[in-house]
Amino acid sequence: MKKFMDGVDRFCYRHPRFGIPDLMLYIVIGNVIVWLFSMMDSSGTLLSMLRFSPYHILHGQVWRLVTFALIPYNNGLFALISFYFYYFIGSNIERQWGSGRFNIYFFTGMALAVVYGFILYFALGGGNQQLVSLLIGNYVSAYYIYLSMFFVFATLWPDMQVLFLFFIPVKMKWLGLLDLALFVYDVARIPFPYDLLPVVAVLNYLIFCGGDLCASFRGRVPTRTQRKNTVNFRSEVRRIRHEQKTKPYTRRCEVCGRTDTEYPDLEFRYCSRCQGYHCFCIDHINNHRHFTE
């Protein structure tokens, strides 16, 4: 898992323009369009044409590999609230991770669900392929992919407060645990082996955030080593100033190595989430793995 994430980060560093900027904006717009048209389609034909179905995909309807992520799972006012909420979550994660890493995360969740859906189809299809395909399509949806994004947000900003039901201030970590309980309940009530589809859909959360999750649990009770590694910014400033006297530059990006001497118009910033005093250029301040020691 660590090697995979290192590979993802290296790829994003080397290709800073990879990915679709503001991906969640386009996904939410697609959800809104499908939601509006579905309200005018009382027969449900539109949603049935967009839903994931291995049987129909193998018979030429390849658009279902993507359009299943555009089907809203709420109606009325709750649909509008969910659109805004998941745009808010996705856009903040993208700003923190960078477009490349966020795109890889979202499409990895879709790919995992699609692959497992086809595995079930070939394993259980037999003589009743259309029925099995219909059952699989009921569980392969964007709901669990969006839920995994919520887990990411709660991991990155566990102490952020939001207004639950618009008036109850609750920290994100408690909402994350509540959603986890609802997720476990969903998995328990779905018959096997379809109950593994939601698990596979959020598996990428553990791939991308497993390290941060373990670090947050370890960080609840600071150890002697962690207290020893606490940053003393005054001493760090003195150290940086001393180094600047012996180096031909003032700031150097930890990722790409560019300096303010070579690129005088480039903006540099220091990351407050890294342990230590680490400088990054504007292209990598929100697109790097945080230093932990």
Image: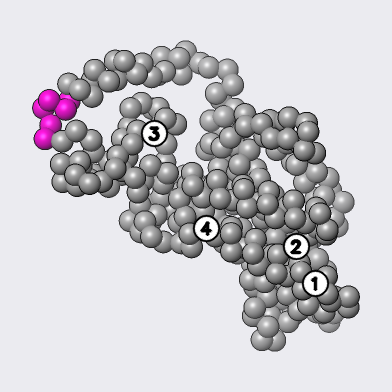
- Was residue 263 drawn as part of the magenta stretch in this picture? no
Q: Nearer the viewer, mark 1 or mark 2?
A: 1
Q: Are marks 1 and 2 in contact (CB under 8 Å)?
A: yes
> Looking at the rendered structure, which numbered label has been put on residue 22?
4
Determine the image quadrant of residue 112.
Answer: bottom right
Q: Which residues are magenta?
A: 243-248
Is disc 3 placed on a helix, strand or loop? loop
Is any atom of residue 124 visible in this view? no
> Looking at the rendered structure, which numbered label has been put on residue 147?
none
Is any atom of residue 265 visible in this view? yes
> Looking at the rendered structure, which numbered label has been put on residue 72?
2
Q: Residue at x 23, y 24 (%)?
A: 240
Which sits earlier in the primary sequence, circle 4 or circle 3? 4
Please state the horizontal and vertical placement of residue 198, each as a whole percent of the image. 73, 55
Please state the horizontal and vertical placement of residue 147, each as a whole percent of the image. 69, 49
Residue matched to label 3: 271
State whether residue 236 is above or below residue 267.
Answer: above
Q: Disc 2 to disc 3, how far (Cα)? A: 37 Å
Which sits earlier in the primary sequence, circle 4 or circle 1? 4
Is disc 2 placed on a helix, strand or loop? loop
Q: Amino acid at mark 4?
A: Asp
On the rendered structure, is 189 left or right of 19? right
Q: Amino acid at mark 2?
A: Pro
Q: Residue at x 12, y 31 (%)?
A: 247
Camera-nearest residue between 18 and 6: 18
Quadrant of the frame with the C terminus: top left
Which sits earlier in the primary sequence, circle 4 or circle 2? 4
Q: Residue at x 34, y 45 (%)?
A: 282
On the rendered structure, is 232 left or right of 239? right
